[in-house]
Image (cartoon, rainbow, N blue to C red):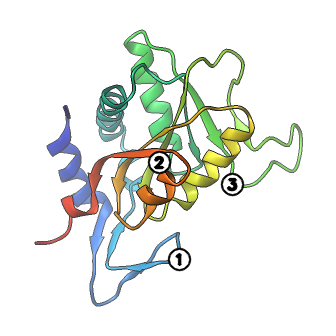
Amino acid sequence: MSLNRESIQSAIFKYSYKENHDQPFVLASGKISPYYFDLKSLVFRPAYLKEIAEDMYELILSQMKQPPGALGGLTMGSDPIIYATTLYALERGVSIMPLIVRKETKDHGSQKRVEGILDGISGKTALIDDVITTGKSTLSAYHELIKIGAVIDKAFCVVDRNEGGKEALREHGVELFSLYTVDDFKEK
């Protein structure tokens, strides 16, 4: 299915993946792990972002009966992937709206937590994230998107760390799919 699997995996190894068993990393979830992914250092490289968008779009199509009406996720990890994937879809004649969830409500202007064009979204919304550990960030986006009427039963990420995120999302009726898991990168 993957158009760019080996290229992206090599780039993640080169730019985004660190493994250190002697000095483990503190993750956004608060967990300590010897495995760390900084996918921003990859998705800010346009050529690799394009490859991720292509593969993400194909993964989404393979798991949903029809293309979603929107892709949504919590800023900042999901932003480049959402924008690139929706643009890739548009090049193929498929309109998917991007929805970005702020970490906190805007304290001025419209005081929105969800940014995007909400009028005219048809179909389901799919959640997007770069890396999922416990699912906390993805669930934060889920709860905000549900409040505005989104229908969500699928989530997609580049890397699933296999640390409970899939199970946490499943408790909310959301099935998680990933391009990779941590096992694709652990030193053997």
Foreground pick, 109 / 150: 150
Decide: is 147 above or below 188: above
Foreground pick, 172 / 7: 172
Mark found first going from the N terminus, 3 or 2: 3
Q: Please, what is the three-letter code of the amino acid marked with disc 3?
A: Lys
Image position, residue 81 (x, y; %): 45, 39
Mark found first going from the N terminus, 1 or 3: 1
Image position, residue 86 (x, y; %): 47, 25
- Helix, strand or loop at disc 3? loop
Decide: is 9 above or below 117: below
Foreground pick, 112 / 122: 122
Q: What is the number of the mark on residue 103? A: 3
Mark found first going from the N terminus, 2 or 1: 1
Q: Please, what is the three-letter code of the amino acid marked with disc 1?
A: Gly
Badge 1 is on which residue? 30
Q: What is the number of the mark on residue 164? A: none
Q: What is the number of the mark on residue 129? A: 2
Decide: is 174 above or below 116: below
